[in-house]
Image (spheres, rainbow, N blue to C red):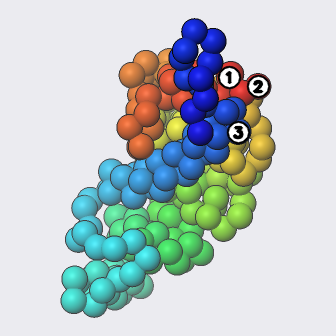
Amino acid sequence: MAKSGPGGGHYVKRQTLTTSVAIALMVGFAAGLVYGVYKSGPQLPAGAPGAVNPSDGRAAMLARLEEQVRANPKDVEAWIQIGHINFDKQEHQAAITAYEKALAINPANAPVLTDLGIMYRRTGKPEEAIRRFDAAIAVDPKLENPRYNKGIVLMHDMDDRDGAIAAWEELLEVNPTAMAPNGQSVDQMVTEFKKQR
């Protein structure tokens, strides 16, 4: 609730601000996950995350891709697409397996490393997530998504506010106008978290 401050201005309780920022970050992170999946490889048909509707073709596509990798286990693009479909289905372990197979063939794929990090986070393995985000950054230092997600994992899963701020400041060095998926500037987000120290 806004209260009048000195000089007739308004201020918001710190607890309310902290809660609002945390909620905004979680919503933004979820939106960023969806965006990250579709940016990291060829487009899949659109659909609701968490469900593969047989009528949209993805179930058939998954079956074809699985047949493809049985015939050619070195088909990196097929493994990536299997990972993406399982990502959407929230079949985290299946996505991890597919992404790991793709990375065994081509370890220098920063978007796939990022998606793998997201999957490790969703399986409750934040340290593994950070390792994959760091690997993605090493492959492509200009890629923003792993830096942003690294900050999210450090902040929300590892209770490392300073580490999260450092990750986001590194993102700002790459792109000073970087935006969170919720539309908030990363610079503004960093400033708010620094005030809460």
Q: Earlier in the sequence, mark 2 or mark 3?
A: 3
Q: Is mark 3 in CB contact (under 8 Å) with mark 1?
A: no
Identify whether 119 is placed above or below 146: below
Tell me the amino acid under the disc marked 3.
Gln
Q: Is mark 1 in CB contact (under 8 Å) with mark 2?
A: yes
Left or right placement of residue 120 versus residue 66 in this view: right
Residue placed under numbered mark 3 in the picture: 15
Residue at (57% x, 9% y) in the render: 7
User: Closer to the camera, 87 or 103?
Assistant: 87
> What is the total number of numbered labels drawn onto the structure image?
3
Q: Earlier in the sequence, mark 3 or mark 1?
A: 3
Image x and y of residue 126, in percent: 71, 54
Residue at (28% x, 73% y) in the render: 47
User: Closer to the camera, 143 or 7?
Assistant: 7
Q: Which mark is residue 194?
A: 1
Residue placed under numbered mark 2 in the picture: 197
Distance between mark 3 and mark 1 Cα atoms: 15 Å
